[in-house]
Amino acid sequence: MAEGVENLNVRMLRVLVTNRATIANFPEIRDGLGQRHKKHILEAIKGNREHTKWLSGKANLPLKFLQELLISKKLSMDFLRESRFSVKGAGPCKVRLPLEVNEDLAYFLGILAGDGHISNPKPHQARWWIIQMCEDALEFQSLVYIPLVERLFCYTPKIHVNKRTDGRRNVYTRINSFVIILYLTNVLGIRSGYKTDIVDMPVCILHSEEKIRLAFVRGLFDTDGTVTEGTARYSTVSEKLFYQVQTVLRSSGIEFRTNVWKKNEIAKQLYTIVIPKRQLGNFSKIVGFKNCRKKIKLEHLLAPSSSGQG
C-alpha cells in the first residue's frame, strides 16, 4: 500500500508540473517548516528574479521549482498536503488535492461513478472543464455531497435546481476546476466524457483495503441504488462494474442475488444486484446509506413491527 501511495504522489506531482501548476498559499506553508527545509527551498528558488514575490506571497510559486526537492525527499511530500493549487488560465480557483486514497475519496469516486459526469472539452478550454453530479435528492446534495467535496478539495460546488414543466425538479451540482479534473483523470485514471456502460472501479480502489472498496460501493448505492419491495438494490448498465461490486459484497460476507434484463430491444441491458430482506441488517452495518431518503427507508424495513416482532 505504501508503494502505491508513493506512486500516486509522484504521478500527481508530475501531472501538476506538466500543467504549470502553482502554489497559492506558499508563504503560509513555509512558515510552518523547519529551518532545514526552508533553507533547501530558498536555494531552489533564489536564482529566479521572481523569488522575492513568491516568498512574500505577491505571486504564486510555480511547483516546478520544488519538484527536485520533493523527488529527492529533501522536502517531504506532506508539503503538498496543505498546498492550494492553481493553474494559469484556468480561473481563480485554488484547491487542495488528497495525497492518499481514503474512505472519503473512495466514496466520492463511487458517487461520481454513479451519477457523476466529467466534461471532455478541448484542451484550450480549461475553464469549461466541469464535474457535474445529478441526484434529485436536494438534501443529499447539500448535507452529504457538498461537505464531502469541501473536505477533500477545499472547494464549495455550486448547486442548481431546475423546475421542469411536469412539476418535478432536476438538482445538479457543478465543480468548475481544471486542477481537480486533472487530478481525477490524469492521476487517478477516472474516465471523462461518456461512461455509462464502460464505467468500472478505479485501479486505485481495486488495490486498496476492504474498507476503501466498501466506501466506493456505498457511493454507488447512494446514487444508483434503491430500497424497494423489502430489498436494497443496485443497478448499472456496466457489466464490468456489476461483477466488481459482486466481488466486494461477497468478500464482505453479504449475500445477494442478481438479475439481468432489458426493458425493450432499444434499451441497454440492465444488471441488478438485490440484497434480500434477511441480509439487510448485515448490509446496513457493512455498507449502508448516507443518502437520507434511502437510509430512512432501510431503517423502516429493519425496525421492529408494530406487533413487537422483528
Image (cartoon, rainbow, N blue to C red):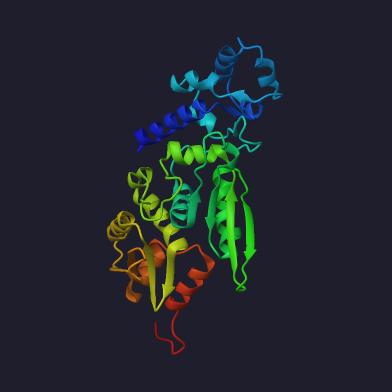
Most foreground residue, 35 or 110: 110
Against 265, residue 125 (above or below) is above
Q: Is residue 236 left or right of residue 257?
A: right
**Residue 8 found in image quarter:** top left
In this picture, is 199 found above or below 286?
Answer: above
Q: Position of residue 92 (x, y in %)?
A: 66, 36
Left or right of residue 29: residue 72: left
Which quarter shows the C terminus?
A: bottom left
Q: How many marks?
A: 0
Question: Residue 32, image x and y in percent?
Answer: 61, 27
| Vertical comparison of 24 with 210: above or below | above
Can you see residue 241? yes
Q: Residue at x 55, y 33 (%)?
A: 124
Q: Residue furthest top?
A: 47
Relative to residue 310, is residue 88 drawn left or right? right
Q: Is residue 98 visible?
A: no
Kindly give the residue lying farthest to the bottom in the view shown.
307
Q: Position of residue 265 (x, y in %)?
A: 32, 68
Q: Nearer the viewer, residue 7 or 272?
A: 272
Vertical side of 71 occupied by 287: above or below: below
Instruction: Please give left or right for residue 20 compared with residue 52 in the image.
Output: left
Q: Quadrant of the N terminus?
A: top left
On the image, which quarter does residue 220 sit in? bottom left
Q: Residue at x 69, y 19 (%)?
A: 53
Q: Where does the image place residue 287, in percent across and percent down from the top left?
A: 40, 61
The residue positioned 51% from the left and 26% from the top of the image is 17
Q: Nearer the viewer, residue 56 or 164?
A: 164
